[in-house]
Amino acid sequence: MLLPRIFPTILLNGIGAVKTVKFDAPTYIGDPINTARIFNANEVDELALLDINATAENRMISLEIVSRISDECFMPLTIGGGVKTIEDIRNAINAGAEKVAINSHAIENPGFVREASNEFGSTTVVVSIDVKKDADGYRVYTRSGKMPTSKDPVAVAVEMQSMGAGELFVNSIDQDGTMAGYDVELIRQITRSVDVPVVACGGAANLEDIRSAIYDGGASAATAGSMFVFQGRKRAVLINFPTRAEIEEALFRE
Amino acid sequence: MLVILDYGMGNLRSVLRRVEKLGHKALLTSDPAELEKASKIIMPGVGAFNSGMSNLETRGLLPTLNRKVLQEKTPILGICLGMQMMCRWGEEGDIAGLGWIDADCVRFNFEDKQGGYLRIPHMGWNTVEQKGDCLLFDKVDQSTRFYFVHSYYVKPHAETLIAGTTDYGVEFASAIHQGNIYGTQFHPEKSHQAGANMIQAFLAQA
């Protein structure tokens, strides 16, 4: 049986690992390579590594960090942050990434997703969609949540699938870092509208939230930051991951 | 010397690093002269069957590869596309494969089946049920999970080929073994310790 994927996302501010709340107020977590090493030792299903400052600073995620992590982590690695060209994707793959996430540049230039999936195959191309709720409903944001667009997330998801995206990260800006649970309604609207795997992002506090994203939201996978890097009410930094038995109990109990 | 065959299909760095981390030396090459000297071969690869076959041909690797595997009986491990190309025929491109094993490589087809909701590609962690007694699984528990990403699978005509099966709408051959020829549809190089144990078992054989 194909198992739902559960994995950590490490956010980078260039060189350090950080964790945000609602895409703001980054808390320093530590060295990303050490963090990745601990997750690898816990045999996590995958690892996502996203640089949240790359686009604003007009650069790409550090390929040195990507290659140092991929050299010792024997699991699929998705990277993202400032990816704008075919060459960027090629360089990321050569540094050891399995999948490359495109966010602002995909939303602003959907044709690029077509170009990328033609060149590397859909399974390599992930589009990450950041969503915030306002008075009119859900709206897609770019530039690390700073730039509102006029676009509806379901329409963007359908468009990205038609352009050849092989997977969609759907991130709720409102839920990010709050540990108040995923925006399951948002996830459900998107999984109903596309066939490609959808990864729920933003808001997880525990395995029950993940269970809900998968069973109620229809997500193929769920990722989290805070849940796997903080411990306790005071949010002390402690890299952690549930055991296989805990995951199986949460996902497969009757 | 272990040769990891580079025929331009996907990034092979993760296979090389996995092998090196296990303390083995390996040569990543697309040179037939280097392949000639191989004592063991790993043939990874991600992508289209027809592109893989044509890349083997344009790099002039086919004569050496066939002789090493079929006559010299050099142990070879095919991973993902590398396993699929061992078949007689590939649906992707409708072309002949290497023809080392009595099997075809076909696309998942879930129309008119209960599994119609299943997404293609089959991507993620799935369990492998071991069949027979293949050395690849010497240090791997029954029903261990491995990482898959593929839209086509190997469909053997002979049951004896099958070393492991996985269920994704159909029960397909996720590992095969025939003499010196081994193949896995999943990616042991991306499957944590279980994958490491499997590669180690392949490399440790005499």
Image (cartoon, coloured by chain):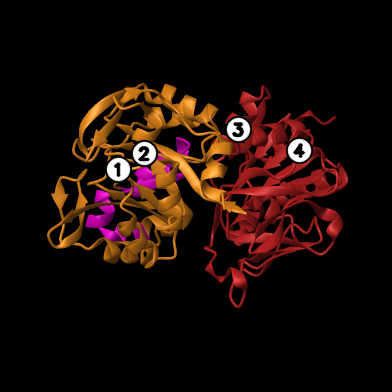
Chain colours: A orange, B red
Task: Please give the chain letter of the residue carrying mark 4.
Answer: B
Mark 3 and mark 4, same subunit? yes
Dot 1 lies on which element? loop
The mark found on residue B16 in the picture is: 3
Q: Position of residue B36 (x, y in %)?
A: 76, 38
Residue behind mark 2: A205
Q: Closer to the N terminus: mark 2 or mark 1? A: 1
User: Closest to the observer: B155 or B110?
Assistant: B110
Task: Please give the chain letter of the residue carrying mark 3.
Answer: B
Q: Which one is closest to the eye, mark 3 or mark 4?
A: 3
Q: Could you give the CA–CA distance between mark 3 and mark 2, rounded to whole angstroms?
A: 37 Å
Task: Please give the chain letter of the residue carrying mark 1.
Answer: A
The mark found on residue B36 in the picture is: 4
The amino acid sitting under disc 4 is Glu
Q: Closer to the N terminus: mark 3 or mark 4? A: 3
The amino acid sitting under disc 1 is Ala
Q: Is residue A177 above or below residue A186?
A: above
Would you say the residues marked 2 and 1 are in contact, meaning their CB atoms lie under 8 Å apart? yes
Q: Is residue B94 above or below residue A99?
A: below
User: Closest to the observer: B94 or A209?
Assistant: A209
The amino acid sitting under disc 3 is Leu
Q: Which one is closest to the eye, mark 3 or mark 2?
A: 2
Q: Position of residue B131 (x, y in %)?
A: 81, 49
Residue behind mark 1: A180
Q: Specify the principal SS of the magenta part.
A: helix
